[in-house]
Image (cartoon, rainbow, N blue to C red):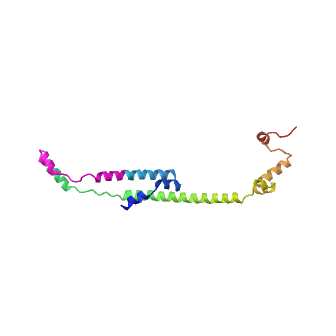
Amino acid sequence: MASKAAVAAVDFTRIYSTLGLGKDTIAALQAFRKRHGDAQRLQSQYASQPTTVDLAHYRTVLKNKAIVDEAEKLLKEFKVVTYDVSAHVKAIETFEAKAVEKAQATAAQIDVELKELQATLANIEEARPFEDLTVEDVGNAHPRILEAVETMVQKGKWTVPGYKEKFGDLSLM
């Protein structure tokens, strides 16, 4: 009874959206929920059916009483077969372990991404406006730009390759 209340209390749509689960994990959870719902429906359907057999009714209806006697004998000798479900339990535990492992990996990945995003946000908040930057600041941030400019000046190149194609020729002559 407590498990039914727990299942009813779980908001799976919120779990799918807020935990950032992978497609495989969500698909596996949905398939498991569907199988569980089907099993519950079958169990309730079979539980509502009568389990007793009225052999007296069959004795009055059937002419061949030997068949009824044989059926009664088989019913008395019938013993419920028990199945070893340890293999199924082990498979479920393996699935659970994999799901927990994937969830932990996802949580770790989200933590790393969150830290990176927080660092980027802090960098953006601390950055100076573009208007306040100087050529020296850009050169210090990206030394390759200074190296490229120095080599171009040494070779006597005063234009940037691709500039005219992109921005057009702004000379008046």
- Residue at figure coordinates x 31%, y 51% from the top left: 45
Please determine whether, in this image, residue 63 is positioned above or below residue 143: above
Magenta span: chief secondary structure: helix
Q: State left or right for residue 7 relative to residue 69.
A: right
Give the mark count: 0
Query: In the image, is residue 11 part of the stretch drawn in magenta?
Result: no
Please determine whether, in this image, residue 121 is positioned above or below residue 67: below
Q: Nearer the viewer, residue 68 or 20?
A: 20
Instruction: Give the farthest residue toward the right.
Output: 173
Query: In the image, is residue 56 part of the stretch drawn in magenta?
Result: yes
Residue 126 image point, x, y percent = 71, 60
Residue 113 image point, x, y percent = 60, 57
- Residue at figure coordinates x 69%, y 57% from the top left: 124
Q: Name the image quarter holding the N terminus.
A: bottom left
Instruction: Give the farthest residue toward the bottom.
Output: 2
Q: Name the image quarter holding the C terminus.
A: top right
Q: Nearer the viewer, residue 59 or 80?
A: 59
- Residue at figure coordinates x 81%, y 54% from the top left: 135
Q: State left or right for residue 78 relative to residue 112.
A: left
Q: State left or right for residue 87 relative to residue 17.
A: left
Q: Nearer the viewer, residue 67 or 129?
A: 129
Q: Which residues are magenta?
A: 38-66
Residue 42 image point, x, y percent = 33, 51
- Residue at figure coordinates x 51%, y 58% from the top left: 103
Q: Nearer the viewer, residue 35 or 16?
A: 16
Residue 40 image point, x, y percent = 35, 53
